[in-house]
Image (cartoon, grey):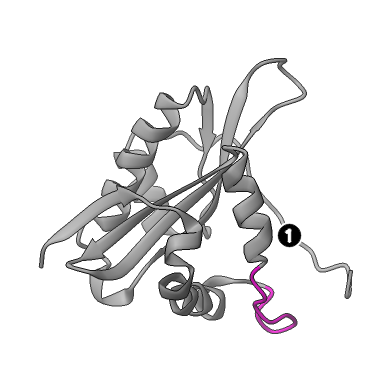
């Protein structure tokens, strides 16, 4: 196993990414019973073109085995303050427990810091595994997130 970590362009990896994104949706999305995945590739490309989207990937050789993505924006609460919010994190089941998530997070911290991001927020499913990982990496729980379906909007 030779896992490498890098920044990649969404457009360059979307065909490889799609099966992992579908698996992610089916495994973790709380809306999976009422929605189907329909990735808006154009939106991701537009965000990437404006520097508002970062994708870091994990590969075992040439095979994509995980990814972590962030959307970057200024917060209207603090003028000039850039924040990045995680869009998605998914690791192929065969590679979980092998520090892949930790290494993706460490890389994205460097990348986001390098583009001037002041604050990053990681959004994960609420479970003990996530709590342990975040605490080990020095993160503090700052908010609690709740979700509710509002129909077919």
What range of the chain is rendered magenta? 31-39
Q: Position of residue 82 (x, y in %)?
A: 60, 25
Residue 94 in percent (x, y) is at 25, 76
The vertical placement of 145 against 33, above or below, is above
At 79% from the left and 64% from the top, the residue drawn is 148
Task: Name the image quarter holding residue 38.
Answer: bottom right
Q: Nearer the viewer, residue 138 or 59?
A: 59
User: Horizontally, is 23 left or right of 80 in the view?
Assistant: left
Circle 1 is placed at which residue position?
147
State whether the magenta stretch is mostly helix, strand or loop.
Answer: loop
Tell me the residue at 52%/60% (across/down): 125
Q: State the residue in front, 54 or 84.
A: 54
Q: Is residue 9 left or right of residue 87?
A: left
**Among all residues in the image, which is located at the extreme left?**
1
Reply yes or no: does residue 137 show up in magenta.
no
Quadrant location, the N terminus: bottom left
The image shows residue 40 at horizontal and vertical percentages of 67, 66
Mark 1 crowd level (few <14, some 14–19, many ≥20, 10 Å Cα): few
Find residue 152 and report its horizontal and vertical position in percent: 88, 75
Task: Name the residue nearer the viewer: 133 or 89.
Answer: 89
Q: In the rendered view of the protein, which quadrant contains the C terminus?
A: bottom right
């Amino acid at each position: 196993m030779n896992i490498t970590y890098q920044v990649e362009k969404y457009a360059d990896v979307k065909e490889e990414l799609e099966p992992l994104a579908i698996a992610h949706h089916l495994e973790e999305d709380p809306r999976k019973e009422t929605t189907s995945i329909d990735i808006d590739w154009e939106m991701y490309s537009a965000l990437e073109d404006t520097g508002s989207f970062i994708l870091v990937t994990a590969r075992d050789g040439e095979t994509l085995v995980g990814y972590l993505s962030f959307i970057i924006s200024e917060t209207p609460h603090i003028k000039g303050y850039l924040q990045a919010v995680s869009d998605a994190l998914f690791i192929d089941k065969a590679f979980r427990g092998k520090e892949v998530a930790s290494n993706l997070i460490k890389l994205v911290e460097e990348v986001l810091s390098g583009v001037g991001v002041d604050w990053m927020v990681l959004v994960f499913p609420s479970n003990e595994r996530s709590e342990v990982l975040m605490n080990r990496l020095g993160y503090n729980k700052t908010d609690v997130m709740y979700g509710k379906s509002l129909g077919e909007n």
